[in-house]
């Protein structure tokens, strides 16, 4: 047994069916009005709708939980595109997503995309792809609804694509019209595949004109396909049906209008069937086989919240226990190994030798680093700076003059003249006290030819940090 559930803006339609050898053996249809909670097929109030479903199932003593949801919404996108024939499914999906983004504002991650290929394209380079796009936000509402209502989702069907299961109608172009008091769902099946669908709001007496408009629009975009038959399945307009069929026949003389019980219901008590459950009954024919998956992953198909929670707790506890046992075993093994390692005399001696070598290595590396740094400083600062000159000139005695000065990498050389030996001694003493001078050398002191000018000599100053 399986349930097929359609939830529209005004009613909840449920078909309970049993299928044997591809035919219905048991059928039960339940249709109940709902005042709120649904907006264009989107479950706006999940708690309210879930409570209504539980109430309906309980009141009608239905214990079946395996369910196919039939989604009827104007937000579902149906397009027919002629595209190249590709072999890999992921390449086809990428191609379809790109083509749709060129035709309309379309973001692939926001939709669940499915496609059908119309006709045989074995030896063809191009084919007609019938594309169905369902908003992920809409599917999320049905997943939550299944969880809270206690149903086990076998998948979902799009309202217009349910007719793809009617294999006996694959050789013709047929229209399926669900005519309600306030809206019409219009679906065209072209040689076995639904390739056009419209859901529109109507007012009193406008159903016929709206259907005619949809038929003419379809035939204008697909001139090769001629509609031969139209199935009308909703008893909401049963009293107006004869006049409606008469007016439709005048406008569409080439179209056969069918209102009898569908072929697939032969052998079923007519009292068990409700026309509002036409699409849910078709969705139940395959008992969920071939239906689109409501969830992206199988692990989400557990709809019993208590069972899922219990399984989660048991799994988490088991995983925690196993991880704790493994961690404790590894910790004990590591402790025993470290204990034997630390207590070994040979390892203690080896460890001390390693520490000594590490200290020596560090000291040697530091010496090398200091030497490299000193070398770089010498290369960059091979000449004295202006502070040295200021210091030298500041300590020149009153009766001493500097005739010339030479600065090189080895230091500073000065040719001097002093009035007396005492002046020379004072000058040398002053130079030695300068912080930037390492050492002083003086050449031979000679008496100047002019007695009044004093003594001539040359002083060599080695600067700190400079190579001699």
Image (spheres, helix red, strand yellow):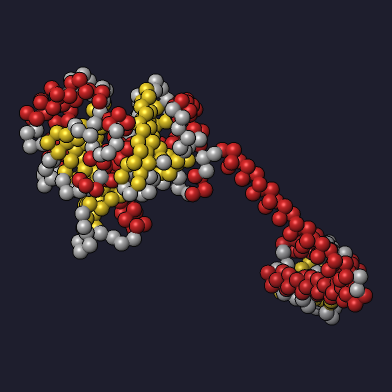
Residue 41 placement, left or right of 116: right
* Residue sitting nearer the eye, 220 or 105: 220
At 37% from the left and 24% from the top, the residue drawn is 32
Q: Residue at x 35, y 36 (%)?
A: 27
Find residue 418 and report its image quarter: bottom right
Q: Is residue 102 above or below residue 261?
A: below
Q: Residue 286: horizontal and vertical position, in percent?
A: 35, 46
Q: Is residue 209 left or right of residue 155?
A: left
Q: Residue 144 in the image: state x and y as whole percent.
A: 48, 36
Q: Which residue is depicted at the point 38% across and 48% down?
A: 289
Which residue lies at the image location 46% right of the left edge and 29% below the top edge? 61
Residue 118 percent across, percent down from the top left: 22, 52
Q: Can residue 331 be seen here?
A: yes
Q: Is residue 79 visible?
A: no
Camera-side residue: 230 or 286? 286
Which residue is the extreme one toward the top? Answer: 204
The part of the image, by quadrant, that contains residue 336 is: bottom right
Residue 141's place in the image compared with 457, above or below, is above
**Image quadrant containing the N terminus:** top left
């Amino acid at each position: 047994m399986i349930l097929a559930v359609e939830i529209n803006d005004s009613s909840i339609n449920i078909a309970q069916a049993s299928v044997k050898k591809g035919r219905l053996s048991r059928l039960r249809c339940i249709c109940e009005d709902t005042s709120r909670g649904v907006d264009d097929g989107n479950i706006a109030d999940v708690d309210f709708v879930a409570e209504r479903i539980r109430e309906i199932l309980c009141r009608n003593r239905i214990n079946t939980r395996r369910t196919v949801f039939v989604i009827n919404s104007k937000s579902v996108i149906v397009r027919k595109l002629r595209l190249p024939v590709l072999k890999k499914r992921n390449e086809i999906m990428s191609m379809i997503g790109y083509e749709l983004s060129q035709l309309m504002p379309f973001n692939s991650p926001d939709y669940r995309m499915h496609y059908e290929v119309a006709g045989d394209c074995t030896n063809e380079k191009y084919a007609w792809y019938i594309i169905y796009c369902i908003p992920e936000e809409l599917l999320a509402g049905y997943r939550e609804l299944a969880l809270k209502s206690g149903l086990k989702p076998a998948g979902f069907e799009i309202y217009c694509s349910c007719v793809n299961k009617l294999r006996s109608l694959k050789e013709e172009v047929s229209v399926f019209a669900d005519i309600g008091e306030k809206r019409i769902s219009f679906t065209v099946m072209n040689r076995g595949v639904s390739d056009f669908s419209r859901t529109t709001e109507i007012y009193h007496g406008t159903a016929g004109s709206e259907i005619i408009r949809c038929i003419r629009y379809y035939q204008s975009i697909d001139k090769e396909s001629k509609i031969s038959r139209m199935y009308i399945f909703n008893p909401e307009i049963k009293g107006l049906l004869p006049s409606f069929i008469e007016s439709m026949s005048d406008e569409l003389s080439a179209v056969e209008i069918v209102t009898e019980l569908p072929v697939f219901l032969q052998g079923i008590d007519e009292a068990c069937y409700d026309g509002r459950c036409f699409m849910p009954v078709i969705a139940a024919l395959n008992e969920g086989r071939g239906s689109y998956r409501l969830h992206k992953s199988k692990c989400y198909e557990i709809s019993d919240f208590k069972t899922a929670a219990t399984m989660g707790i048991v799994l988490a506890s088991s995983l925690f226990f196993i991880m704790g046992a493994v961690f404790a075993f590894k910790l004990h093994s590591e402790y025993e190994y470290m204990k034997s390692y630390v207590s070994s005399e040979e390892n203690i001696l080896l460890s001390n030798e390693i520490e000594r070598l590490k200290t020596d290595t560090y000291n040697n590396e530091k010496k090398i680093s200091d030497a490299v740094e000193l070398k770089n400083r010498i290369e960059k600062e091979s000449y004295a700076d202006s502070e040295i000159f200021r210091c030298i000139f500041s300590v020149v005695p009153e009766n001493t003059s500097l005739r010339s000065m030479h600065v090189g990498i080895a230091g500073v050389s000065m040719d001097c003249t002093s009035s007396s030996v005492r002046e020379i001694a004072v000058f040398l003493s002053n130079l030695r006290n300068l912080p930037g001078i390492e050492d002083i050398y003086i050449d031979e002191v000679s008496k100047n030819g002019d007695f009044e000018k004093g003594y001539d000599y040359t002083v060599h100053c080695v600067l700190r940090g400079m190579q001699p």
